[in-house]
Amino acid sequence: MEQENNHTLIGPFKQLVTMDGLPEAGPIEDEELELIENAGVLVHDGHIILVEQYDKLLKITQEEGYPLQKIEEPMVLLPGLIDAHTHICFAGSRANDYAMRVAGKSYLEIARNGGGILDSVRKTREASMVELVDLLKKRCDRHLAEGVTTCEVKSGYGLTTEEELKMLEAIKLVNKHHALELIPTCLAAHMRPPEHTDSRLYLQEVVTQLLPQIKEQGLANRVDIFIEDTAFNEENSLEYLSAAKEMGFDITVHADQFSTGGSRIAAEIGAVSADHLEASGDEEIELMRNAGVVAVVLPGASLGLGMHYAPARKMLDGGLCLAIATDWNPGSAPMGDLLLQAALLGAAEKLTSAETLAGITIRAAKALNLSDRGTIAKGQLADLIAFRTDNYREILYQQGKLKPSKVWKQGKEV
Protein backbone atom coordinates (compact mmCIF):
# COMPACT_ATOMS: atom_id res chain seq x y z
CA MET A 1 0.00 0.00 0.00
CA GLU A 2 1.36 3.43 -0.92
CA GLN A 3 2.32 5.61 2.07
CA GLU A 4 0.43 8.86 2.55
CA ASN A 5 2.40 11.85 1.29
CA ASN A 6 2.42 14.44 4.06
CA HIS A 7 4.89 16.90 2.61
CA THR A 8 3.32 20.32 2.01
CA LEU A 9 4.70 23.49 0.44
CA ILE A 10 3.32 26.69 1.98
CA GLY A 11 3.85 29.97 0.14
CA PRO A 12 4.76 32.21 -1.52
CA PHE A 13 5.39 34.86 1.14
CA LYS A 14 6.46 38.39 0.27
CA GLN A 15 8.84 38.30 3.23
CA LEU A 16 9.84 35.46 5.53
CA VAL A 17 11.52 36.51 8.80
CA THR A 18 13.36 33.41 10.03
CA MET A 19 14.57 34.73 13.46
CA ASP A 20 17.43 32.29 12.90
CA GLY A 21 21.12 32.92 13.56
CA LEU A 22 20.58 35.70 16.11
CA PRO A 23 22.73 36.14 19.23
CA GLU A 24 21.34 34.25 22.24
CA ALA A 25 21.67 37.29 24.52
CA GLY A 26 22.35 41.01 24.44
CA PRO A 27 21.37 43.64 21.85
CA ILE A 28 20.21 42.78 18.31
CA GLU A 29 20.33 45.18 15.37
CA ASP A 30 17.54 45.03 12.79
CA GLU A 31 20.18 44.37 10.13
CA GLU A 32 20.86 41.01 11.79
CA LEU A 33 17.38 39.72 10.92
CA GLU A 34 17.42 37.13 8.14
CA LEU A 35 14.77 38.09 5.58
CA ILE A 36 13.95 35.88 2.61
CA GLU A 37 11.94 37.57 -0.14
CA ASN A 38 9.32 35.60 -2.11
CA ALA A 39 9.91 32.58 0.09
CA GLY A 40 8.23 29.28 0.86
CA VAL A 41 8.38 26.62 3.57
CA LEU A 42 8.35 22.88 2.92
CA VAL A 43 6.82 20.99 5.83
CA HIS A 44 6.86 17.27 6.68
CA ASP A 45 5.40 15.54 9.77
CA GLY A 46 4.86 18.86 11.54
CA HIS A 47 8.44 20.02 11.06
CA ILE A 48 10.18 22.36 8.65
CA ILE A 49 12.45 20.57 6.20
CA LEU A 50 13.31 23.40 3.78
CA VAL A 51 13.13 27.21 3.81
CA GLU A 52 14.01 28.68 0.46
CA GLN A 53 13.00 30.89 -2.46
CA TYR A 54 9.48 29.84 -3.44
CA ASP A 55 10.31 29.11 -7.08
CA LYS A 56 13.01 26.60 -6.08
CA LEU A 57 10.67 24.84 -3.64
CA LEU A 58 7.84 24.85 -6.19
CA LYS A 59 10.05 22.98 -8.64
CA ILE A 60 10.81 20.30 -6.04
CA THR A 61 7.13 20.11 -5.10
CA GLN A 62 6.02 19.63 -8.70
CA GLU A 63 8.69 16.98 -9.36
CA GLU A 64 7.74 15.00 -6.26
CA GLY A 65 3.99 15.55 -6.52
CA TYR A 66 3.73 17.18 -3.11
CA PRO A 67 0.55 19.12 -2.23
CA LEU A 68 0.70 22.90 -2.22
CA GLN A 69 -0.94 25.43 0.07
CA LYS A 70 -0.91 28.52 -2.12
CA ILE A 71 -0.87 31.96 -0.48
CA GLU A 72 -2.80 34.22 -2.84
CA GLU A 73 -1.96 37.67 -1.43
CA PRO A 74 1.14 39.46 -0.11
CA MET A 75 1.97 38.21 3.38
CA VAL A 76 4.83 38.24 5.87
CA LEU A 77 5.65 34.98 7.67
CA LEU A 78 7.01 34.80 11.24
CA PRO A 79 7.52 31.95 13.69
CA GLY A 80 4.52 31.35 15.95
CA LEU A 81 4.56 33.58 19.02
CA ILE A 82 5.53 32.14 22.41
CA ASP A 83 4.00 33.52 25.63
CA ALA A 84 6.43 32.41 28.34
CA HIS A 85 4.50 33.55 31.44
CA THR A 86 0.73 33.39 32.01
CA HIS A 87 -1.86 32.53 34.67
CA ILE A 88 -4.76 31.83 32.29
CA CYS A 89 -6.19 28.89 34.26
CA PHE A 90 -8.50 30.72 36.68
CA ALA A 91 -12.13 31.41 37.46
CA GLY A 92 -13.83 34.72 38.21
CA SER A 93 -13.03 38.34 37.50
CA ARG A 94 -11.19 41.02 39.48
CA ALA A 95 -12.83 43.98 37.75
CA ASN A 96 -13.76 45.37 41.18
CA ASP A 97 -10.08 45.29 42.18
CA TYR A 98 -9.16 47.19 39.03
CA ALA A 99 -11.77 49.88 39.67
CA MET A 100 -10.50 50.33 43.24
CA ARG A 101 -6.87 50.39 42.11
CA VAL A 102 -7.34 53.08 39.46
CA ALA A 103 -9.34 55.06 42.03
CA GLY A 104 -6.24 55.13 44.21
CA LYS A 105 -6.80 52.28 46.68
CA SER A 106 -3.69 50.43 47.88
CA TYR A 107 -3.05 46.69 47.58
CA LEU A 108 -3.82 46.22 51.29
CA GLU A 109 -7.06 48.22 51.06
CA ILE A 110 -8.18 46.10 48.12
CA ALA A 111 -7.33 42.90 50.02
CA ARG A 112 -9.30 44.11 53.08
CA ASN A 113 -12.29 44.65 50.79
CA GLY A 114 -12.19 41.00 49.71
CA GLY A 115 -9.99 41.45 46.62
CA GLY A 116 -6.46 40.43 45.70
CA ILE A 117 -5.03 37.03 44.79
CA LEU A 118 -7.06 35.27 47.48
CA ASP A 119 -10.25 36.38 45.71
CA SER A 120 -9.08 34.47 42.61
CA VAL A 121 -8.14 31.54 44.86
CA ARG A 122 -11.67 31.40 46.30
CA LYS A 123 -13.32 31.55 42.87
CA THR A 124 -10.96 29.00 41.32
CA ARG A 125 -11.47 26.58 44.21
CA GLU A 126 -15.24 26.92 43.77
CA ALA A 127 -15.08 26.20 40.02
CA SER A 128 -15.62 22.66 38.80
CA MET A 129 -13.11 20.91 36.56
CA VAL A 130 -15.54 21.34 33.64
CA GLU A 131 -15.79 25.10 34.28
CA LEU A 132 -12.01 25.51 34.56
CA VAL A 133 -11.44 23.57 31.34
CA ASP A 134 -14.04 25.64 29.48
CA LEU A 135 -12.60 28.96 30.70
CA LEU A 136 -9.05 27.94 29.85
CA LYS A 137 -10.09 26.69 26.40
CA LYS A 138 -11.72 30.05 25.57
CA ARG A 139 -8.57 31.95 26.52
CA CYS A 140 -6.50 29.53 24.43
CA ASP A 141 -8.84 30.13 21.46
CA ARG A 142 -8.15 33.86 21.66
CA HIS A 143 -4.41 33.51 22.13
CA LEU A 144 -4.14 31.14 19.17
CA ALA A 145 -6.15 33.48 16.95
CA GLU A 146 -3.69 36.26 17.89
CA GLY A 147 -0.69 34.18 16.81
CA VAL A 148 0.43 32.51 20.04
CA THR A 149 1.26 28.86 19.28
CA THR A 150 3.03 27.99 22.57
CA CYS A 151 1.85 29.25 25.95
CA GLU A 152 3.14 28.67 29.47
CA VAL A 153 0.35 28.29 32.09
CA LYS A 154 0.79 28.37 35.86
CA SER A 155 -1.23 26.87 38.64
CA GLY A 156 -1.27 28.93 41.84
CA TYR A 157 -4.94 29.74 42.49
CA GLY A 158 -5.54 26.45 44.32
CA LEU A 159 -2.96 26.58 47.13
CA THR A 160 -3.86 23.12 48.45
CA THR A 161 -2.61 19.79 47.15
CA GLU A 162 -6.06 18.85 45.86
CA GLU A 163 -6.82 22.20 44.22
CA GLU A 164 -3.39 22.61 42.64
CA LEU A 165 -3.73 19.13 41.13
CA LYS A 166 -7.17 20.13 39.83
CA MET A 167 -5.69 23.15 38.05
CA LEU A 168 -2.82 21.17 36.52
CA GLU A 169 -5.21 18.43 35.42
CA ALA A 170 -7.41 21.06 33.72
CA ILE A 171 -4.32 22.36 31.88
CA LYS A 172 -3.44 18.80 30.84
CA LEU A 173 -6.98 18.14 29.54
CA VAL A 174 -7.03 21.31 27.42
CA ASN A 175 -3.52 20.58 26.17
CA LYS A 176 -4.67 17.18 24.84
CA HIS A 177 -7.32 18.64 22.57
CA HIS A 178 -6.28 22.24 21.75
CA ALA A 179 -3.98 23.31 18.93
CA LEU A 180 -2.28 25.85 21.23
CA GLU A 181 0.49 23.98 23.03
CA LEU A 182 0.49 24.59 26.79
CA ILE A 183 3.61 24.37 28.98
CA PRO A 184 2.41 23.79 32.58
CA THR A 185 4.17 25.25 35.62
CA CYS A 186 3.48 24.53 39.30
CA LEU A 187 3.07 27.83 41.16
CA ALA A 188 1.72 26.38 44.41
CA ALA A 189 4.15 28.87 45.99
CA HIS A 190 2.14 31.86 44.71
CA MET A 191 1.39 33.01 48.25
CA ARG A 192 0.71 31.49 51.65
CA PRO A 193 -2.84 30.12 51.68
CA PRO A 194 -5.25 31.46 54.32
CA GLU A 195 -5.39 28.06 56.06
CA HIS A 196 -1.66 28.23 56.92
CA THR A 197 0.08 30.54 59.39
CA ASP A 198 3.65 29.41 58.63
CA SER A 199 5.04 29.92 55.11
CA ARG A 200 7.96 27.54 55.60
CA LEU A 201 5.72 24.71 56.78
CA TYR A 202 3.41 25.29 53.81
CA LEU A 203 6.33 25.05 51.37
CA GLN A 204 7.50 21.84 53.07
CA GLU A 205 3.99 20.44 52.55
CA VAL A 206 4.18 21.31 48.84
CA VAL A 207 7.54 19.52 48.56
CA THR A 208 6.46 16.37 50.40
CA GLN A 209 2.83 16.05 49.25
CA LEU A 210 2.23 17.93 45.99
CA LEU A 211 5.44 17.84 43.95
CA PRO A 212 5.84 14.03 44.08
CA GLN A 213 2.30 13.61 42.68
CA ILE A 214 2.95 16.17 39.94
CA LYS A 215 6.11 14.27 38.98
CA GLU A 216 4.41 10.88 39.12
CA GLN A 217 1.43 12.02 37.01
CA GLY A 218 3.54 14.03 34.54
CA LEU A 219 1.52 17.20 35.17
CA ALA A 220 4.42 19.69 35.02
CA ASN A 221 8.19 19.85 34.72
CA ARG A 222 8.54 23.42 35.99
CA VAL A 223 8.28 24.98 39.46
CA ASP A 224 7.84 28.68 40.20
CA ILE A 225 7.71 30.80 43.38
CA PHE A 226 6.77 34.42 44.11
CA ILE A 227 9.58 36.03 46.11
CA GLU A 228 8.27 39.27 47.61
CA ASP A 229 7.36 40.83 50.97
CA THR A 230 3.71 39.85 50.44
CA ALA A 231 4.59 36.26 49.41
CA PHE A 232 7.73 34.23 50.30
CA ASN A 233 11.09 35.39 51.66
CA GLU A 234 14.47 34.60 50.13
CA GLU A 235 15.58 32.04 52.70
CA ASN A 236 12.44 29.90 52.48
CA SER A 237 12.37 30.26 48.71
CA LEU A 238 15.94 29.01 48.28
CA GLU A 239 15.23 25.98 50.46
CA TYR A 240 12.04 25.21 48.49
CA LEU A 241 13.60 25.67 45.06
CA SER A 242 16.62 23.55 46.02
CA ALA A 243 14.29 20.68 46.93
CA ALA A 244 12.30 21.11 43.69
CA LYS A 245 15.48 21.19 41.59
CA GLU A 246 16.76 18.04 43.31
CA MET A 247 13.49 16.34 42.25
CA GLY A 248 14.28 17.21 38.63
CA PHE A 249 12.08 20.25 38.04
CA ASP A 250 13.17 23.23 35.93
CA ILE A 251 13.10 26.39 38.04
CA THR A 252 11.62 29.80 37.28
CA VAL A 253 11.05 32.67 39.70
CA HIS A 254 8.66 35.61 40.11
CA ALA A 255 11.45 38.07 40.97
CA ASP A 256 12.08 41.76 41.65
CA GLN A 257 8.53 42.97 40.97
CA PHE A 258 8.41 45.49 43.81
CA SER A 259 11.70 44.85 45.62
CA THR A 260 14.97 43.12 44.75
CA GLY A 261 16.17 39.79 46.08
CA GLY A 262 14.30 37.32 43.88
CA SER A 263 16.79 37.66 41.03
CA ARG A 264 19.64 36.81 43.41
CA ILE A 265 17.87 33.58 44.37
CA ALA A 266 17.18 32.83 40.68
CA ALA A 267 20.89 33.24 39.91
CA GLU A 268 21.99 31.19 42.93
CA ILE A 269 19.67 28.27 42.17
CA GLY A 270 20.42 28.32 38.42
CA ALA A 271 16.86 29.13 37.36
CA VAL A 272 15.97 28.96 33.69
CA SER A 273 14.32 32.37 33.98
CA ALA A 274 13.49 35.21 36.36
CA ASP A 275 10.24 37.00 35.54
CA HIS A 276 8.88 40.54 36.24
CA LEU A 277 12.14 42.38 37.18
CA GLU A 278 10.57 45.85 37.35
CA ALA A 279 12.80 46.66 40.37
CA SER A 280 16.03 45.17 38.95
CA GLY A 281 19.14 47.34 38.71
CA ASP A 282 22.73 46.95 37.54
CA GLU A 283 23.68 44.49 40.29
CA GLU A 284 20.71 42.21 39.59
CA ILE A 285 21.34 42.32 35.83
CA GLU A 286 24.97 41.29 36.35
CA LEU A 287 23.97 38.40 38.65
CA MET A 288 21.47 37.06 36.13
CA ARG A 289 23.86 37.45 33.19
CA ASN A 290 26.65 35.58 34.98
CA ALA A 291 24.25 32.76 35.89
CA GLY A 292 22.73 32.52 32.38
CA VAL A 293 19.23 33.32 33.64
CA VAL A 294 16.75 34.47 30.98
CA ALA A 295 15.04 37.77 31.91
CA VAL A 296 11.30 37.64 31.22
CA VAL A 297 9.65 41.06 31.34
CA LEU A 298 5.90 41.48 31.70
CA PRO A 299 4.61 44.76 30.26
CA GLY A 300 1.00 43.68 30.87
CA ALA A 301 1.56 43.83 34.62
CA SER A 302 3.03 47.34 34.34
CA LEU A 303 0.04 48.47 32.26
CA GLY A 304 -2.45 46.86 34.63
CA LEU A 305 -0.84 48.26 37.77
CA GLY A 306 0.02 51.66 36.32
CA MET A 307 3.72 51.26 37.15
CA HIS A 308 6.97 51.57 35.19
CA TYR A 309 8.18 48.86 32.83
CA ALA A 310 11.08 46.56 33.64
CA PRO A 311 14.34 48.16 32.38
CA ALA A 312 14.42 46.12 29.17
CA ARG A 313 16.91 48.34 27.34
CA LYS A 314 19.35 48.24 30.24
CA MET A 315 18.97 44.46 30.46
CA LEU A 316 19.82 43.94 26.80
CA ASP A 317 22.77 46.31 26.97
CA GLY A 318 23.87 44.43 30.09
CA GLY A 319 24.07 41.21 28.09
CA LEU A 320 20.87 39.46 29.16
CA CYS A 321 18.66 37.23 27.05
CA LEU A 322 15.35 39.12 27.15
CA ALA A 323 11.94 37.50 26.65
CA ILE A 324 8.61 39.35 26.69
CA ALA A 325 5.44 37.72 28.06
CA THR A 326 1.92 38.84 28.96
CA ASP A 327 1.51 37.71 32.60
CA TRP A 328 -2.16 37.28 31.57
CA ASN A 329 -3.97 36.92 34.91
CA PRO A 330 -7.23 38.09 36.51
CA GLY A 331 -5.62 40.68 38.77
CA SER A 332 -2.67 42.76 37.60
CA ALA A 333 -2.58 41.82 33.89
CA PRO A 334 -6.05 41.05 32.50
CA MET A 335 -5.37 42.13 28.89
CA GLY A 336 -3.32 39.19 27.64
CA ASP A 337 -2.42 40.63 24.20
CA LEU A 338 1.21 39.61 23.61
CA LEU A 339 1.81 41.48 20.34
CA LEU A 340 0.29 44.73 21.60
CA GLN A 341 2.23 44.62 24.86
CA ALA A 342 5.52 43.81 23.14
CA ALA A 343 5.03 46.72 20.71
CA LEU A 344 4.28 49.18 23.54
CA LEU A 345 7.27 47.99 25.58
CA GLY A 346 9.50 48.29 22.52
CA ALA A 347 8.40 51.89 21.94
CA ALA A 348 8.86 52.86 25.59
CA GLU A 349 12.20 51.10 26.12
CA LYS A 350 13.66 51.82 22.66
CA LEU A 351 14.03 48.22 21.57
CA THR A 352 14.83 47.43 17.96
CA SER A 353 12.20 45.51 16.01
CA ALA A 354 14.59 42.54 16.04
CA GLU A 355 14.89 42.64 19.85
CA THR A 356 11.13 42.85 20.32
CA LEU A 357 10.35 40.05 17.86
CA ALA A 358 13.10 37.85 19.35
CA GLY A 359 11.56 38.44 22.78
CA ILE A 360 8.30 36.81 21.72
CA THR A 361 9.81 34.03 19.58
CA ILE A 362 13.32 32.58 19.85
CA ARG A 363 14.25 34.13 23.21
CA ALA A 364 10.84 33.25 24.68
CA ALA A 365 11.54 29.64 23.64
CA LYS A 366 14.79 29.81 25.60
CA ALA A 367 12.88 31.04 28.66
CA LEU A 368 10.88 27.80 28.50
CA ASN A 369 13.94 25.64 27.79
CA LEU A 370 12.55 24.70 24.36
CA SER A 371 14.97 24.32 21.45
CA ASP A 372 12.53 23.08 18.78
CA ARG A 373 10.65 26.34 18.07
CA GLY A 374 10.98 30.11 17.82
CA THR A 375 12.66 30.17 14.41
CA ILE A 376 11.75 29.21 10.85
CA ALA A 377 14.58 26.80 10.12
CA LYS A 378 15.19 23.20 9.12
CA GLY A 379 14.22 20.75 11.87
CA GLN A 380 12.10 23.23 13.82
CA LEU A 381 8.38 22.76 14.51
CA ALA A 382 6.28 24.25 11.72
CA ASP A 383 4.63 26.77 14.06
CA LEU A 384 4.02 29.71 11.73
CA ILE A 385 1.98 32.91 11.53
CA ALA A 386 1.29 35.07 8.48
CA PHE A 387 0.33 38.75 8.44
CA ARG A 388 -1.48 40.48 5.59
CA THR A 389 1.27 42.99 4.77
CA ASP A 390 4.34 43.20 2.52
CA ASN A 391 6.65 44.72 5.17
CA TYR A 392 7.44 43.03 8.50
CA ARG A 393 7.93 46.43 10.14
CA GLU A 394 4.18 47.04 9.89
CA ILE A 395 3.57 44.38 12.54
CA LEU A 396 5.04 46.37 15.44
CA TYR A 397 4.29 49.74 13.84
CA GLN A 398 0.58 49.01 14.10
CA GLN A 399 1.08 48.20 17.80
CA GLY A 400 -0.97 45.04 17.99
CA LYS A 401 -3.80 46.08 15.68
CA LEU A 402 -2.41 44.03 12.77
CA LYS A 403 -3.22 40.46 13.76
CA PRO A 404 -2.17 37.28 11.93
CA SER A 405 -4.46 36.23 9.09
CA LYS A 406 -3.20 32.65 9.14
CA VAL A 407 -1.80 30.45 11.91
CA TRP A 408 -0.20 27.01 11.55
CA LYS A 409 0.60 24.65 14.42
CA GLN A 410 2.99 21.87 13.45
CA GLY A 411 2.22 22.54 9.79
CA LYS A 412 -1.57 22.39 10.10
CA GLU A 413 -3.52 25.59 9.53
CA VAL A 414 -5.64 26.28 12.59
Image: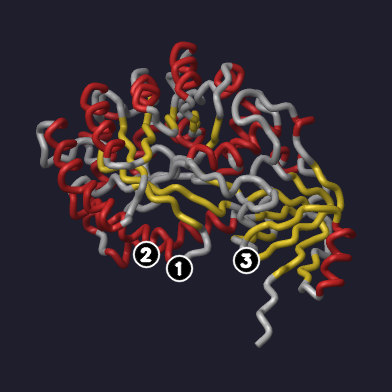
* Residue lying furthest front: 1
Label whose residue precedes the other's in the sequence (2 or 3) = 3
Q: Is residue 242 above or below residue 165?
A: above
Disc 1 element: helix
Mark 3 packing: few (<14 Cα in 10 Å), some, or many (20+)? some
Q: Residue at x 68, y 84 (%)?
A: 2
Which three-letter amino acid code belongs to the residue tagged 2? Leu
> As rendered, which of 396 and 383 lies closer to the eye?
383
Labels 2 & 1 near each other (Cβ < 8 A): yes
Image disc number at residue 177:
1
Q: In the rendered image of this protein, does residue 214 appear above or below residue 294? A: below
Kind of residue at badge 1: His
- Which residue, given by chain and number where applicable, does mark 2 sit on? 173
Q: How far from the left and from the top, in percent, is residue 275? A: 43, 31
Image coords of residue 213 (percent x, y): 22, 53
Q: In the rendered image, which quarter is residue 33 located in? A: top right
**Residue 203, image x, y percentages:** 18, 36
